[in-house]
Image (cartoon, rainbow, N blue to C red):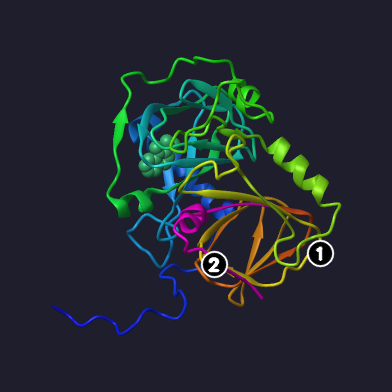
Amino acid sequence: MRLSRPSPYPRPISTAAPAIWKYDDVCDFVREAGDLITAEEAERRVLILENPALRGQSCITPSLYAGLQVILPGEVAPAHRHSQSALRLVLDGEGAYTAVDGERTTMKRGDFIITPSWTWHDHGNLGDEPVVWLDGLDIPTVRFFEAGFAEKSEHKSQTPQREEGDSLARYGSNMVPVDFYQQPSDPTKVFVYPYRETRRSLEKISRGTADDHFGFKLRFVNPATGASPMPTIGAFAQWLPQGFKSRPARCTDGTVYVCLEGGGQAVIEGETHDFTVNDVFVVPSWKALELNAAEDTVLFSYSDRPVQQMLGLWREARL
Ligand code: 1HN
């Protein structure tokens, strides 16, 4: 037996640290990983972005995983499925595809692609240059619940069952098939949010008035439900006009940010981190974040916000 701490803390004190990974720096390691092992040997060739305060835990926040995956020309990352949900944010190179439950999508820079829980997925590179993307998974969340299953396919690659773009046409164009009603536990049918569309929306709304704290910020939804595309990971995109300086804000969801365009400064609890294109930074729970944009800037971000909201735990403070 042991005495417990007398009472909960008055506010979150994250075990994670703020951190930034400069793409210029990690790029060399990504290239080296490509020389050391094949995608097939590795199953997935991923450099884990490990939170410096959570050494050995393979996570970027206590609930989320982040990594940079690279696939070389001609390689295949073989088909498998698992309970963990994944997102991909394409950063560098052209010519790769990912297949989700029988449909391929060509990976273009800035595309937000998801692999919902227990959906078959494989990747391949049909082009002539390495392709790099950020992987975001809910691995620590699933580990916490001790609810993880995984299975390898007997086929290296899935044979496409539908034409590319079928799911977007069928479920992602403000319509759904006449007899389709999404069940809450079913995986979303829309698994790609092309950057072209995201950027067009952000650019358009950026002609209006910016929010003092977030600039112009949207959250990704499953169009059939209006809910987060995955129950365990929420994702966001925001536009910060050149010269924009946000007011500070805190939230209980530790958040991973990726700079897709532009650059500036992330001031996390008073500490300044300069970021530019393809840099990744993490803002732990309840750390105050201010964003300054040196030029027109687009940020993608993801967190466990939908989990916290479903559990009635999520809070934010706009300062
Ligand atoms: C996984 O399946 C992928 O499918 C990427 O690309 C990263 C990290 C841990 C466990 C499974 C992928 C992963 C992963």
Q: Which residue appears at 81% of the width and 59% of the height? A: 242
Q: Which residue appears at 62% of the width and 31% of the height? A: 94
- What numbered label is drawn on residue 50? none
Q: Could you say which quadrant of the image residue 112 lies in?
A: top right
In the image, 279 versus 268, the foreground residue is 268
**Ligand 1 position by quadrant:** top left
Q: Do the numbered discs 1 and 2 sit on residues whose CB atoms are within 8 Å?
A: no
Relative to 188, 80 lies left or right: left
- Alpha carbon of mark 1 to alpha carbon of mark 2: how far? 28 Å
Q: Amino acid at mark 2?
A: Arg
In the image, 181 versus 66, the foreground residue is 181
- What numbered label is drawn on residue 243? 1
Q: Could you say which quadrant of the image residue 2 lies in?
A: bottom left
Q: Which residue appears at 40% of the width and 56% of the height? A: 59
**From the viewer's perspective, is residue 246 above or below residue 227?**
below
Asked if residue 45 shows in the view, the reply is no
Q: Secondary structure at mark 1?
A: loop
Q: Amino acid at mark 1?
A: Gly
- Image: magenta residue range: 299-319
In which quadrant is the C terminus drawn? bottom right
Q: Kindly tell me whether mark 2's CB lies below 8 Å from ligand 1.
A: no
Q: Residue 311 lies in magenta, yes or no?
A: yes
Relative to 144, 236 lies left or right: right
**From the viewer's perspective, is residue 262 above or below residue 166?**
below
- What numbered label is drawn on residue 315? 2
